[in-house]
Structure formats: C-alpha cells, structure tokens
Image (spheres, rainbow, N blue to C red):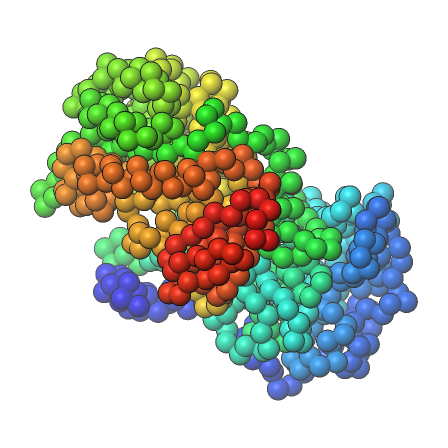
Amino acid sequence: MTAWLRIGKRFGFPLLLACLAAYAWAHLQFGEPSAQSVPASLKTPGAVKVAKGLGELPQPGQFVRAASTGSLELSVDPSTGHFQVHDLRNGNMYRSYPDPEHWPSETQEGTWRTHLRSPLMLRYIDLSGSKSLAQPKDTNFLEEQGTIRDYKLLPGGFSLTFDLPSKMISIPVQVTLENDSVVVRIVDAGIREGALRLLSIRVYPMFGAVHSAGQEGFLFIPDGSGATIPFRERQANASLIYQEPIFGMDEAFRSPIFEPSRNRVSMPVFGMRSGGRSFLSIVEDGAAYTEIVASPSGVFSGYNWIAPVQMYRKPYSLLTSRTKQTFAEVYDKNNRFGGDRVVRYVPLADGRSDYVGMAERYRSYLVERYRLKPINSRSGELPLTLSLLGGEQEDGNFGSRYLLGTTADDAKTIVRQLYDRGVHEMTVRYMGWQPGGYSAAGRFDAVDSRIGGNAGMKSLVSFAHSLHVPVFLDAPYGVNRTGADGFSRKRDGMRNPGGTIMDDWVSLPFLQKTIDRHIAFFRSLGIDGLAVRSLGETLSSNYNTNYPGSRLETQLQQEQLLRELAAASLQLRGTRSNLYALPYLQAIDRLPDDYSYDTFSDTGGVPFLQIALHGFIAYTSDFGNDRQEYRKQLLRNLEYGANPSFVFASDNTDNLLFAEGIHPYNPNYRDWLDLAATEYRLMNEALGDVQSEPIIGHRALAPEVKETVYAGGKRIVVNYGTEPYRYGETVVPPMDYRIIRGGDNR
C-alpha cells in the first residue's frame, strides 16, 4: 500500500485509480465471481433451451472414438466440440468440461454457468470507434449460440472450427493424442475476425475441473519455484484468483505505474491433482503470449480449475501529456499476436500424481526436447559460485562517482584464500569489469583500467586456471547505457507500441552487428564463459520501426544470440532464466527458491523447478551473504539442492550498499571467508556426491520438516521448526538438518 501511495503522489491519484481499475479488469476476466440472481438462457449449438441439470453437459452416448495410443483413448462429441480422455493405464477419465459427478450440486447461475459448460471462452473489443472509449467484453460459445463446422477425424484425433456468427469470429482447433499426452492446438491461420477484435481465448478451460468434495487435491501454479493451491470447500474470496503471464510481463505493454508484486513465471507449465487423478500441462507453441489462470472452488464457481489464457491483443500506455505525465490505455486493432497456440496435457500414471511426479514428467520432457545431459563433475565436489564486484557507480546529488570494488589482483587474493580454506571447486563470476562498472552496461571490448585492464584480467584468468577455477565475465546483454558500438537510444532502443523508448533496452538485431567482435575480445582474454544477464531473463516486444519484433521474435533473437555465443566455445550461465534458454546454459544463478506469499496459496512453495532441473543444470539461489534470514535460507538451499553462492568485494564495501545497479548488503570478503568456507564444507558433504543425480522425492514429514530424496537413496531432512524431530533413529534438531544415507531409516 505504501508503494501505491508513493505512485499516487507522483502521478496523481485520478490516474492511480484509473490504472488500478484497469488492472483489476484485466486480471479478473470473464465476469464477477458472485452468483447472478437471474439465470441466462442456456443454449447448446443449434438448440433453444436446456433444462438445468446433467442435461446441460455433453451426454455419454454422443461421444465417438477419435484415437488411441497404448496409454490413452480420445473420444469427441461432435455436437458440442467437447472431448474425453480415458487413461487406459488406470481407468481415470479426463474431460474437457466440468466433472458431471459434481454438476448437480453446482449453484452458480447466469453467464458463469455457461462459461463452465462452454468449450470456448473469449474476450473481445469493438475498435471501430474511439480507441480510448472501447471496453473489453466477455462471452462464450454457448452464450453466442455458436455452431461447429469443418468437423473431421484426423490421424490421432480430430479438428473442428468454433463459429460465432453473432460476433463474426471463427476459431479452428485440433485435438490429437501423442503417446501419453493430449495436444490441443489453436490454428492461427484459420482464425477469423470481423468488426470485433479478439483480445484473448480460453479453449477447453474446464479441462479436469472438479469440486473439492472433501477429496485431497491441489492446483499447481508456476509461481517462483512452484506453489500449490490446496482444494478447499468454497472459498468466497475473489483475491484467490491467480493469473500471470508466462515468461513475465511484456514491458512494451506495462502500465507506467504498475509494479509487479509476484514472482515471474519462468516455466510454461501448470497442473492439477484431484484424488488419484493428476495431469501436467505444458504450454508449447505460443507460450510467450499465454497467461496461466487458476481459480479455486468458491471464486467463480464450486469447481477448482486451471487453464491457459491465450492473449491476442493487449492494451498499451499512450503518453497523452508529457508535462502532466498522463497516459491512455489503447489497443491496436491491426496488430494481433500471431502463431499457433499449443498446450500439451499429460495425465500422470499411478503413484506419480503429486507435484514431484509432475516435475519428474516435466524433467523427462526437457531432457528429450533440449537433449540435456547429466552434469559432469570434474572432482565430484560441489562448486561454489564466487561473484566478485569489480566496480560500480554510486548515486549522488551532482551525478555519479566510480566505486572501485575489486581489482584483478584482489580477485587473486580472494580466490587463493578461499582455496587455502578448502574450497577447491569454485567458479568466478566477475561483475562490473567493464569501463564504468556494473551499471555502465553495453561495452564489451575492454576491461576497466582501474581494476587492472585487459592485462590484469588475463593474469587473473591464468592464475585461476592454475587452480582449475573457471572464470566467467558478467555480460548484461540487452542493455546499453554507454552508447558503446554507436548505440543510440532513439535509433536503436526498444520502443512500446506508442513509440515510447523503453529505458536502455537494446533492439537485439543491433547486437548482431557486433557479436563477432565481442566474441573475439572475450576469447582473447582466455575466459571460460559469460554470465549472461537479460538474455533469457526478460522478454518484451519491440515496436522500433528500425528493428520491429514481436515477443516471440524477441525470444527467437535471444536464442540466436545465445546459440552464437555457445558455438564460440563460451560456456554460459543464466540469471533467473526462462526455460527456453536451457539448451545453451551450463548453470542458472539466483534461481527462484520460493513463492510470492500471496493469498492464492496457504501451503507454501514447492521445489518443482529444482526437481525438474537438478542433475542436469546447476543452479544457485540468492547470495549467501545477502540473505535476510541466514540460517533458514541456508537450510532452504540444502532442501532445494542449490549450489553455494557468495558475492564479495575488497574495497568500498560500505558505499556499495548505495550503488546504482547492485546493492549487496555486506560484500566485504574479510568478514565472510571463514563462514563461506564452513558453509561450503557442509553443503559439499550434503550435495557434492548427488549433484549429477535427479531429485526423485520431496515431501513434508511434519509442518516444519521437509525431506528431499535423490536417486540412489540419499536423503536430506531439514527441520525449520522450534522442536527436535525424530526420523527413525535419527534426531533432527530445530533449525538444522541431517543427511540420511541410501537405505537408512526409510
């Protein structure tokens, strides 16, 4: 609330209230959650009225077999467009509409009752008049008395087109089986719009939807490391809705006063468990334009449901007055986000229906799709990531001044002292090495002379290599604050649809002009690789007419740059990376290890992301000497299988707290060397011999006690509580952990 008050004072409270209203409208789509007193006429395609009851839903006798694999059978109702998936391995049934068992007790009326029954929900807008006056509207296939055309069976499934003549909108869909998955595709080439323009589509949004009905279940959302929303009986609280864009917000469409409060979604997945039924969903094509919405029982109905929202247009902020700093939210009727939208639904087999089973299935998907290989450890010991801050800018009343943090010779001293304390496996990540320091991003052709210049860096690399320590240079590609390589914000910067320059973001095709020269420079220093920031971390559309690019095109441009760097024998480390960057990364630093502490989950985060990656991609969490709760977050690293990580500097360590771009709380290496070495030893003992092993189990043994299990049987039991916990013959003290070797105390 304090942040919003500051924003109100800066931009004016009328604008603040308008933006808050717009935000609420955008995030609580498709009507209000409260039941309406007068039910709408409920119509099926071509019919007139349907009596309230099971007759509102597709009837079992209407389904025809469309396809079958060794594990799944797909059936379709040609009259409604709905489908069923029968899991032949265990008899479970998954429907594209609400579970009929609970329908007689569903009390929701009005438009939302038809939303629940409809195979298609959409949001549209009339942009034929004034853009600023247009208001989005919601409807569904049944409300519009839509018709189905072009229905046909395909090899592996079926296709059809949902026609809404009253809105002059047509949406073609294909549903097919692929091994253990059902794949739903919206075919972009067949979408038709008339006078009205599509904003978003939800196709089969109620897939797997069930009432809580006393059963154990949860919605899995990709918030941070992952979180679950447990089933409850009718929680009448609209704030429990979760809706977030995959790969984070597109900065080109961000409101100028909106500050995201939730973790960015880095993995395009969601899921649900209800009793013995469980499915994982993977958003494939079109993930950059997809948002995940999760609604527990009691918000919009008695059903728990989770679905992808396919975005086709978004409002952008058009500056209307520079002096008053006022904006208008407008849409572009001619710019529809293109491309097929593909979502893969994977029913899970018996015994793997929890979030661990979902994460394991996602891991196998990532390994197959990106050809990931198990981590190959040179020594079998866990590597410590040592981030060193070379130089940085300090804000001042009359400009900035340079703060020298760590010279190349200082770096040698720090590495040697850690090595002498028993840290024989480490990776150096040198930040702020470029002229001007950490915040002076954009120049990649020289090392600042104040930290030793090119010669000093080469000397550091040679020294580190003598100890088998690799050196990575921090490379904030995507941002240019120095004008390096002839960069001009006006000519080469990214812009939003209104033409406004987006801070210091670089149009990625501009980087293509200089990438070969950068690579030659990096190789001349002898470094092992780059720690790429922004590439794979942020994803935005670009409306600079010199370098226009959709959000999907920006993703492909990022991948191309990463591919070229990797092809030049430069190893790459990401930072909070989106998972489309995985094929090019050796490790990910500062991987989220928690959830957003929002009202949508009262059971806390789960290590879904870590389970999916461990053994194939190394990762760290936040710096060990930058933790708010040192002991608790150390235990979290042990629970989540993260590598140790510290950020150090030699000089100006107090002043760095007020630096422009990075604010380490206490980077003075002299204060931390012994503690870092101690932490390294205990983490190496716990995790060193399983760094190449996948996590195969994770559970809560008690409310404050968690167990992580690795292939081979090794277990880490962490006790966050205030009382000892007995695990077989082992006692785990409060705020402590114990290592259980394979086969012990099971």
Seen from the viewer's position, the closer of residues 255 and 191 is 255
Give the side of residue 312 with respect to residue 597, left or right. Answer: right
As drawn, the residue found furthest toward the bottom would be: 37
Residue 493 % position (x, y)? 36, 35
User: What residue lies at 42% left-to-right and 62% top-to-bottom?
Assistant: 724
> Is 489 situated left or right of 228 in this image?
left
Q: Residue furthest front?
A: 729
Residue at (42%, 52%) from the top-left corner? Answer: 737
Residue 473 appears anywhere in the view: yes
Residue that appears at 76% across and 74% down: 101
Q: Closer to the camera, 545 or 102?
A: 102
Residue 189, picture quadrant: top right
- Residue 34, relative to residue 677: is it above or below? below
Q: Picture coordinates of residue 122 (x, y %)?
A: 63, 61
28 up-or-down from 378: above or below: below
Quadrant of the snapshot with the N terminus: bottom left
- Classify 310 as above or below 724: above
Query: At x 71% / y 61%, what residue is drawn?
Result: 277
Give whichever of 29, 197 is nearer the camera.
Answer: 29
Q: Residue furthest left?
A: 398
Expressed as whole percent of the image width and height from the top left, the position of residue 514 reads: 38, 20
Looking at the image, residue 111 sits to the left or right of residue 67; the answer is left
Q: Is residue 518 visible?
A: no
Expressed as whole percent of the image width and height from the top left, the position of residue 285 reads: 63, 43
Task: Please tell me which residue lies in front, 635 or 23.
Answer: 635
